[in-house]
Amino acid sequence: MTKEVDKYIQEVALPLKHIFKDMAKSAPSKIFGLLGNAIIVPVYTNLLAPTQYGIYAISLAVLSFLCILFSDWIGLAGLRFFRQNQLCDEIPKYISTLVMILISNLCVMYILTISFRHAFYEYFNIPPKIFLFVLLLIIPVAVRALLFQVLRAQIKPGAFTVSTIVNQVLTILCAVYFIHFLHFGAAAILIGMAVSIVIIDILLVFQTDLLWYLRLEKPDFKTIKSIFAYGIPIVVASISLWIINQSNKFITSHFHGLSDAGFVGVAYNMTFPILMTLFAIITIAAYPRIINHYEDKIDVRPVISKLTGYYMLIALPIVIIMCIYAKDIMAVFANEQYQNAYILLPYFAFSAFFLSFTDYTTYQYHLSKKTYILTTLKVVSALIGLVLNIVLIKKFALTGVGIATLISNILYFILTVTVVVPSLEWKIPVKRILHLALCFIPTGCLWFVLCKTSVLAMLQINILLIFYYLLFYFTKRFFKEEPV
């Protein structure tokens, strides 16, 4: 065995093997989450009028905005430095510090939101009652976000799967109960989320052994400094992505009313949550192990390149199918009063594709702790996206929403590929891309033939996907990739 082959086995093949095992353990939760997100759309569109769905979409966007500012980044920073503190045997102090930061941030959030609540009502176009529900919901959501990241850092994919599945089932059941039997409208979904997430938080406390780790001791200010230094750029970056992909709901509501905002919400929920849940099967499993390998001084670029190839294999056919059969998919999954939302599916599907793609091209910034670069790229994309949203939505309504979102996400992807960190740049999987492209040619011919028949659209979709993946499987021996 040559040194090159041995190195490839140790630095690429074995890490991939471990990642695939973790993927197999966490995949059920993601697939179940995908199905749950797919079920939510027909259930909620049949129970809520477009105006109520618009309120629901806006309330979730406000919740996301507050979580980005005050809680999500704590969990992400916690995941990044978990291994480092684990090697130093300082996990109890580390977890306690994270919890202290979270509690402090939530206190600051409540002071600010209550003091400036009228500005929130006006700027976000959100009813006071709904805003109150959002403020109550943010506590269990923030706790869940932190504990999920701790669970990921502990590499417990089985426990992660159980928690995710239970969370999805409880949320749907509680929301349907409150909407159908108590007639609470959009508020019912928020109440249902609160009930289910509180139960999940209790489960996560035991799965992560949080009570065993917590200590009443003096905070480690060096750790706090590191967390804030890493996390604050993430906040700015995440707000930028929020502007790109979620501010359109508020702008649409402002120019065209809550009903159109409801259409945007339906199209968003049929693409971003569903597709990114599916696409995250790889990154959820890979991220902790890639961090560990990098900390162990192993070159992670070949592994990231291989994973990117698998991502494109999974994602591209599905996204293209959603573009071609947008109207048929919307007719199946949403109530007929939401059919106009199909216009947005192609734009949002490809936006989700490029956004998920950046999970691989941005590893370089996280590993090198140069998240300020990532922040700059997202801010640039967000500023351009905000201008596009305002100009295009006002003039072209739903079509403007789609165009602005897609351009902003493509721009962000291009920036992450062109602005690189030396020795951590993304390596393009050329052979995999060529293989995928060649498989699309006969699949496209088959689609052209199917369009001339009376075969049902949903059956056509299944035939095309099966044909494509079988074609890929039987031709892969002609595209064997050499050790990177």
Image (cartoon, rainbow, N blue to C red):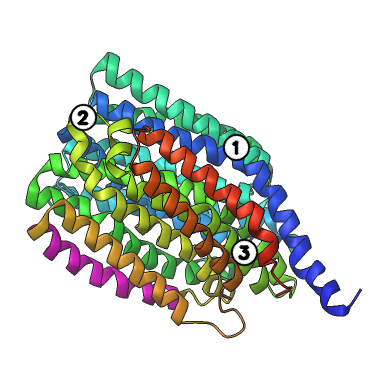
Q: Is residue 330 left or right of residue 390?
A: right
Please state which of residues 425 and 98 is positioned toward the viewer in this rendering.
425
What secondary structure is the magenta-colored segment mainly? helix
- Identified by mark 2, the residue type is Glu
Which residue range is magenta in the image? Answer: 372-394
In the picture shown, does residue 435 fall above or below 91?
Answer: below
Residue labelled with disc 2: 336
Residue at horizontal 50%, vertical 82%? Answer: 420
Q: Which residue is mark 3?
A: 81
Q: Earlier in the sequence, mark 2 or mark 1?
A: 1
- Distance, label 3 to label 1, CA atoms, is 27 Å
Nearer to me, 312 or 204: 312
Image quadrant assignment for residue 298: bottom right
Residue 10 position, x and y percent, is 81, 68
Residue that label 1 marks: 28
Does the magenta-highlighted stretch encompass residue 376? yes
User: Who comes first in sequence, dot 3 or dot 1?
Assistant: 1
Residue 233 x/y as whole percent: 42, 70
Q: Is residue 379 visible?
A: yes
